[in-house]
């Protein structure tokens, strides 16, 4: 007998229409089907991503208490039975990253000791994802965090637009790395007037693949900023020269290794025509915005008459709202993978795209044991 599905709840927060086929499968009865959704950090009423996801699923948030004791320790109490159920922990990383990580670890362990069947972490922005490569005598913190999550009891992770796709290899359990690009592409088509006169811009050669993917899907031109103003991750010492060379170091007689020439970047240039066009800068993370502000100034000098910045994760740290407000950037578009309500109050140029639809569908499919292929339609390696 085919499984009966309830009609989905249409969230009042959704600005965009859902891709065809998703709305027909977004509701299920939590009490009957053996799953619960818990927020690792309690969201503000009616505004948190966890609340939006549960509204789409037609479910209620699980009963739990997460708080800080007077000595700064995190305490988690599960207030209902989770024995034999699939538990989804939603953790949107707020500004205090380390506290959020501890909340997630402790809640996962509490659910594990409460005999939950599966514990799935819904972590739209995965913290420490920029620390996924060796830096001098540093460490690969992202791999450490992956091991900690596995030890705490997580059996699966749903995330979005990992900073490096290779991070998936750090985990000993399945990782579904969803994409936000369909929602951002839809925003461009519906919210940017005359987007056909736009050009997709990569603010550095490292972002060229992502920008090329957007340009090809929108049938637009591509431009890349290159030159001395850029400072990329690849320029850093990756640790393979550790310990570093010392001037008076002794060298084995007869050993003459080829000398690696130092990098010297050319004067800053824009490869591609942006004159008289709308420039849309795309990236995965907007954290410190100085590089985006500098790119916008260059594009303005080259003749772009309107500048948009689009990214999946809007961390917007430090003075980002003020710098954006005072810059040549006309609009910054990010998803709600990371809470940024305070930054939006400080800067009206910041706009939000809701991605709770795809996360709720991923939860439904994982719980029902359905294929995730529908959520990765037309997704390529470079997306």
Image (cartoon, rainbow, N blue to C red):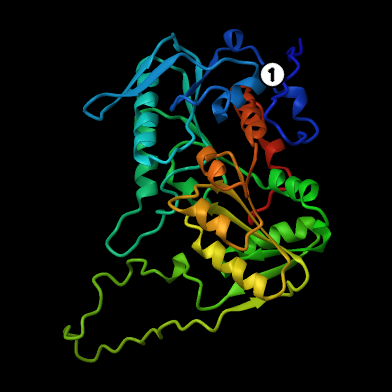
Residue at (76, 10) in percent of width and height: 1
Q: Name the residue under label 1.
A: 27
Q: Nearer the viewer, residue 243 or 318?
A: 318
User: Residue 97 falls in which quadrant of the image?
Assistant: top left
Image height of 255 relative to 169, above or below: below
Residue 193 relative to residue 141: left or right: right
Q: Percent x, y for residue 232?
A: 47, 67
**Residue 175 appears in the rendering:** no
What is the tally of numbered marks visible in this picture?
A: 1
Residue 154 relative to residue 279: left or right: left
Image height of 7 relative to 212, above or below: above
User: Residue 226 falls in which quadrant of the image?
Assistant: bottom right
Q: Percent x, y for residue 43?
A: 49, 26
Q: Element under label 1?
A: loop
In the rendered image, the residue lying farthest to the bottom is: 254
**Residue 182 appears in the rendering:** yes
Residue 47 relative to residue 317: left or right: right
């Amino acid at each position: 007998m085919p499984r009966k599905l309830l009609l989905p709840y249409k969230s009042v927060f959704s600005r965009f229409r859902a891709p065809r086929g998703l709305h027909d499968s977004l509701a299920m009865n939590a009490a009957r089907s053996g799953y619960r959704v818990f927020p690792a950090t309690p969201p503000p009423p009616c505004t948190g991503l966890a609340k939006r996801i549960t509204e789409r699923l037609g479910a209620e948030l699980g009963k739990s208490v997460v708080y800080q004791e007077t000595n700064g320790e995190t305490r988690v109490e599960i207030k209902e039975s989770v024995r034999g159920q699939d538990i989804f922990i939603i953790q949107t990383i707020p500004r205090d990253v380390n506290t959020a990580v501890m909340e997630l670890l402790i809640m996962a362990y509490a659910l594990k000791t409460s005999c939950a069947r599966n514990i799935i972490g819904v972590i739209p922005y995965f913290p420490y994802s920029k620390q996924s490569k060796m830096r001098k005598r540093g460490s690969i913190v992202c791999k450490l965090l992956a091991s900690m999550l596995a030890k705490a009891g997580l059996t699966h992770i749903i995330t979005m637009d990992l900073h490096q796709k290779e991070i998936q290899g750090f985990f000993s359990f399945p990782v579904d790395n969803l994409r936000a690009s369909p929602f951002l592409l839809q925003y461009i088509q519906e919210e940017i007037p005359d987007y056909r006169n736009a050009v997709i811009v990569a603010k550095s050669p490292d972002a060229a693949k992502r920008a090329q993917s957007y340009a090809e899907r929108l049938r637009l031109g591509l431009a890349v900023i290159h030159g001395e103003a850029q400072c990329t991750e690849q320029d850093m010492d990756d640790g393979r020269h550790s310990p570093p060379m010392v001037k008076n170091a002794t060298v084995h007689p007869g050993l003459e290794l080829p000398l690696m020439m130092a990098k010297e970047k050319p004067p800053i240039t824009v490869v591609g025509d942006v004159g008289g066009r709308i420039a849309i800068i795309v990236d995965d993370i907007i954290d410190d915005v100085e590089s985006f502000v500098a790119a916008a100034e260059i594009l303005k000098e080259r003749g772009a008459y309107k500048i948009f910045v689009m990214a999946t994760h809007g961390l917007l740290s430090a003075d980002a709202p003020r710098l954006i407000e005072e810059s040549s950037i006309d609009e910054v578009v990010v998803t709600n993978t990371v809470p940024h309500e305070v930054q939006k109050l400080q800067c009206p140029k910041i706009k939000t795209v809701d991605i709770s639809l795809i996360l709720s569908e991923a939860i439904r499919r994982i719980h029902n044991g359905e294929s995730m292929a529908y959520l990765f339609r037309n997704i390529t390696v470079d997306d």
